[in-house]
Image (cartoon, rainbow, N blue to C red):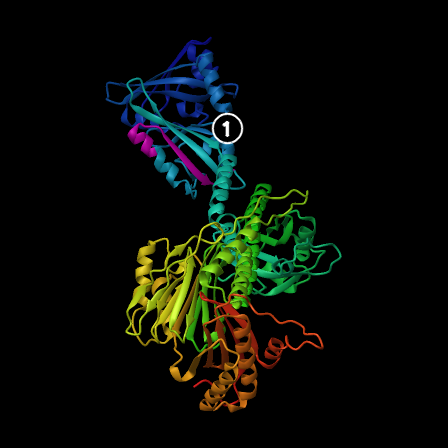
Amino acid sequence: MGEHGVASAAVDAAGRVIAWSAGARRLLGYEPEEMLGREVGTLLTGAVPASARTCLAEASDWRGPLHVRHRDGHSVALELDAHPLLDRAGDTQWFLTATVPEPAAQLRRRALEQFPIPMALFDQDGLAVSVNSAMEAAMGRPESDLVGRRVGEAGRGLRRLPGFEGLDDAVLRVLRTGEPMPYEAWLRAPGEPREHAWLVSLSPLTDDVGEVRGVCLAAMDSTEQFLARRRLSLLNESSVRIGSTLDVARTAEELAEVCTDHFADFVIVDLLNSALAGEEEAPLPGAGPLLFRRTAQRSVLEGCPESVVPLGSRHTYDEHSPQGRVLTTGRALLYAAEDVTRYQWAAGSPERARSIDTYGMHSAMAVPLRARGVTLGLSILVRHRTPEPFGEDDLLLAEELAARAAVSVDNARRYTRERAIALELQRSLLRHHASRHTAVEVASRYRPASSLAGIGGDWFDVIPLSGARVGLVVGDVVGHGVQASATMGRLRTAVRTLADVDVAPDELLTRLDDIVLRMASETTTDDAGAADGPGEIGATCLYAVYDPVSRRCSMARAGHPPPVLVAPDGEAEFLDLPIGPPLGVGGLPFETAEFDVREGSVLALYTDGLVQAPDRDMDDGLDLLRQALAGQGHPLEETCDAVLRGLLPDRPADDVALLVARTRALYADQVAGWDVPADPKFVAEARKLACEQLATWQLEDLSFVTELVVSELVTNAIRYGGSPIQLRLIRDATLICEVSDSSSTAPHMRRARAFDEGGRGLLLVAQLTQRWGSRHTRTGKIIWAEQALPDGAGAP
C-alpha cells in the first residue's frame, strides 16, 4: 500500500473535485480547500489513456496507471481505481481511489522504462498507452507525441510513416486473435539516420479472465544480423549466377548484374587488354597508362546513361589515378565523391567528371579482379540513387564477389585460349577441302563440341595409296583440350606413315596400338625430378582401303562404331565388321574384313559423337544415322548436312567427325595386265606389250621411260622373285606400272661402284618417275612406279 496509504476523492459530473481525503493530502500535498471545486484534469501530467476515456464515456469502472503532479511540481505515479456513482438527479459522479505502486511494481516500471530495446503498450483500440525511452529515441519523438497514436502516426498531424502500415495491421491482428506474432521490417524510423532491420515481437496482454486488453510491442534492431544473412545469401546466389558459362564477357556481365540487383546503382567491369591477350603479369608502377577493354556495364537506369565508354571499346586509366593504384597495389578502395576526389576519379576525363555531376554519384568502390596471382582488371561500383554511401561491409562483400568472378573470368579466359589453340590445331591437321581422288568422291564435316569440356581428338583423313587405291580413316582420341588434339595429330601422322608403306588394315591398327602404348608409357617429371605415373591415352580408329580396280574394300576397326554402306539403289546398312579392342589396350588382335563395293556406293565413316547423345541411346542414334543416309543420288555435301541436321543438337556434347565417300571404278580400258614367265627372254616381250598398250592409250611420249621401268622391274622379279609374276599398267591420274611376284623380300636401292655391271636399275627408276615403292600382299609383293601424264592426257 505504501507509506502514504490510500488516497480517495470524489468528482462530480463536470469533473470538479467535491471531496478530498486526508490520504490524498498526504500523497499529493494539496489541502482540501485547495482542491475542492478544482477540475481534476489539472493534476494530470500525461495523456489520458484511451481506455480511460472509453470508460468515462460509458460510465464504467476503470483501473490503470496515471501520472499526477505533486504540489511541489514533481510527478507521482499512481495506480488509480475509478468507480461511477449516480446521484439523485441521475448524473454520474466518480469515486476515485489511488495508491502508490509497491516497490516491486515501481521496479518493473523502471525496468520497462530503462530497457534498451524499444517497447510500447497498446490498448484494445491499437493506440499506444505507454512507451519507454528507447522507443522515444528510435522514433525521435517524446512519449506525449506517441501515446494515443497508432503505429506509424508521427506527431500531432497524424502523418503516416512509410513502411509502418504492415506493422499497424499486425498489432490489430494480435488484438483480434490473441496470438503472439513475430514481424520483420526493413524501414527507417523517424529517429534513425538510415533504414534498419527490425525484429518485432507482438504479444497480447490479457486480464484475469483471459480477455485481450492490449498488446506489448518489443522491437530489436537486427540490422547487423540481417545484413550478415543477406551477404551470405548473396554470396550463395553469386556462386550460382556468376561463372555459369566459360565466356569472359558473360561472366563479367553476371558480376555486374548481381551487384546492381542487390547493392549498387551502376557497375562497370573493365578487363586489362594485356590479360585478355594472354599476358599474366601484374601492372607495374611507371609502366604508363593502363589499357582496358570495357567488358560489362549495368545500371539501375535504363541504357546505362552514366557510362561514357562504349561497351567493348578500349580506354585507359592513368596509373596515378585511384583506378591505377587499385591495380598496382591489389587492394580495393572505397571513396566518397567529394570535390577533391571526384576529379581524381574522373582521371582527367571531362566526360567522366560531367557524368559524376549529372547523375549525383556520391559513393563508389573500385575492386581489383585477381585470380591465381594474375591481375585481370577491376570492377567499379557506384551509388547515385541509393542515398546511403557504401560502407566497409559493402567493400568486403564487393571484394568477395570480385574474387569469385575473377576465378570464373580466369577460367573462361584460359578455356577460350585453350579452345582457340585446340581449334587451330584441329584446322591445321584436318583437311576441310579434300583433294580429288580417282577412286572416290569425298565430303566431310567436323563439328567441335559446345560443352565445357572443350575441343576433342576426333579426326578423319583420305590417303592416296599406290595402284590408284585410297585409304579412308576416322579416329577419336579419348579426352578433350589441347592434349587430346596434340595426341590426335601424332596418331594421324602415324596412320599416314603406316599407310604409305601399304600395310594391311589389321596390321596398321596393330602397329598403331603399339604407338599408343608407347605414348601412354611416357612419363613427365615434376620440378623435384620425381617421375609421375604413366599417362592414360585411349583412342578408337577405323581404317579402310578401297581398290577401284577390283572394287573391293578391306577394313578393320579398333573399338570404333561400324561404317555404313549405302548401295547405289539407296539402301543403307551397317557393315558386319569385326570389332577390335580400342587402341591402347594391347595384346589383342585386329581382324581385316573385305567387302565387294559396287560403283556409286557410299561409305560413311564417323565418330561416336554423331550417334551418342545424353537424351538417346546408341541404338537409336545408329538407326537415325541409317535413315539419314538412305536414298540414292544425293550430292555428298547435302548428305553431310542432312546427317548433322537430323542427329545433332545445336550444341553437341562431344566432337563429331563425319567422312562420306562415293566409290568410283577403273574400267577394263584403263587397266592392262599380263602374266610373265620366269624367263629373262620374256623381258623384251614385256617391253613390247607395254609400248603397244601406251600406243592404244595415245601415251607414246611415255614409251621410253616406261620401257626402262618395265625392263628393270620385270628383270628384278625374274631374278630375285618367284612365280607367278604379273605386269600391270593402270591409266589413272598418272601412269602406274606394277610388277608382282611371290617373294616377300622388299627391294632397295644401293649405290653401285664404278665397275659394277648392275645395281643401277632402281636408282634410274627413282630418278625418272614421280615416285616408286613396294607393298606386301598375301602372296608376295608388288613393286610400282608412277609417271605424270603429258599435258592434256588426263584420265579418261
Residue 492 seen by the camera = yes
| Relative to 606, residue 152 above or below | above
Q: Looking at the image, is 226 positioned above or below residue 775?
A: above
> What stretch of residues is rendered in magenta?
172-191
Residue 434 visible to the viewer? no
Queried whether the magenta region covers residue 181, the answer comes back as yes
Asked whether, in this view, residue 9 is left or right of residue 745, the answer is left
Which residue bears the numbered disc 1?
133
**Residue 175 in magenta stretch:** yes
Nearer to us in this view, 521 or 481: 521
Quadrant of the image for the C terminus?
bottom left
Spot occupied by residue 29 in the image (x, y as percentages of width and height): 48, 14
Q: Secondary structure at mark 1?
A: helix
Question: Which amino acid type is shown beneath numbered disc 1?
Answer: Ser
Residue drawn at x 74%, y 54% as measured from the top left: 285
Q: State which quadrant residue 765 falls in.
A: bottom right
**Considering depth in this image, is 131 or 697 the residue closer to the camera?**
697
